[in-house]
Amino acid sequence: MTVISVPGSATDTVAPTTRRRRKHNVLLIVGLTLFGLLVLVAILAPVLATHDPIQQDLAHARLAPGAPGHLLGTDELGRDVFSRLLYGARVDLRVGVLAVVSPFIIGTVLGLVAGWFGGWLDTLIMRIVDVVIAFPFFVLVIALVFALGAGTGSIYVAITMVGWVAYCRIVRGEVLVAKEQEYALAARASGLPTWRILFRHLLPNVVLQAVIFSMSDIVLTILAIVTLGYLGLGVPPPTPDWGSMIQDGQQFLLTQWYLATIPGVAVVITGLALALIADGLVERFDSR
């Protein structure tokens, strides 16, 4: 039996919604596949790399992509660009994902507490949030890393100290709405412990927006790592990372453009994959 869509009918309304849902499911699948491939390539870097990423060979410096034995050419010190790109992915993706975990947990817990209890505790937490937000994210992260010293440990600490505020604001706003819902009022009236109401009833219903935001936050964190590497405040050399590769290659941009462009493209692809995942998650759960 063929269903005829009549303008203004329920079928006419549902069909575009279904098509839009399918479109965003495709985006989610593409984003997950692309990011999964990036993670897989990073994990298999020791297997896929054709050379030692830190080994110098000045006799074969600045070879063009496609040179014998060097798929993406070599840099100014004769190091294989393809191998450094793979190992750079290991560093940047690992730090980018792990650096979001602590801000996510801290911000979510503080947002739950502030939104549920309110009063002076909410005021205190939100005043701290306002102070941190008053400073640009990148400027504050760079200043903290500069004060703490270069290295992954300083990056984790700096991003945690700055990044938690976004999750706190998101979760707090969700809690202010959710705690007036019937299920939250019923849980409170039944005499359940506060911790159980927060973590068993409220958290599963308010954490979704924070999870979706974390996809974009990983992109922002990777950009921060690349920026720090570009400024010489990131992962200490000779460990390769995309930011230091861009910084090393910029002086040869007119002659050996690939040295700075290839790691830049890797950053763009990573950001695109995570953006597709976030967009797909938003549509998928909003439709539910």
Image: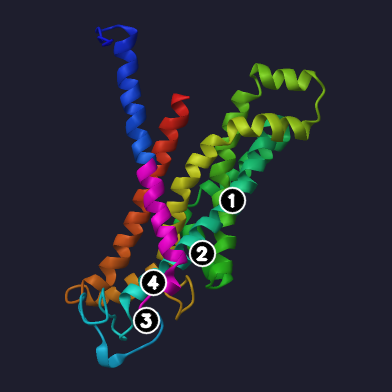
Reading the image, the residue beneath label 2 is 143
Q: Is mark 2 on a helix, strand or loop?
A: helix
Is label 2 in contact with label 3 (beta carbons under 8 Å)? no
Residue stretch in magenta: 29-51
Q: Label 1 is placed on what type of residue?
A: Pro
Q: What element carries label 1?
A: helix
Reading the image, the residue beneath label 4 is 48
- In the displayed structure image, the side of residue 269 where residue 151 appears, left or right: right
- Quadrant position of residue 55: bottom left
Q: Label 3 is placed on what type of residue?
A: His
**Of the residues under marks 1 and 2, which one precedes in the sequence?**
1
Q: Residue at image x 48%, y 24%? A: 288
Q: Is residue 68 magenta?
A: no
Reading the image, the residue beneath label 1 is 103
| Residue 258 locus on image (x, y percent) | 23, 71
Reading the image, the residue beneath label 3 is 51
Up/down of 201 relative to 137, above or below: above
Q: Residue at image x 54%, y 64%? A: 155
Q: Which of marks 4 and 3 is in front?
A: 4
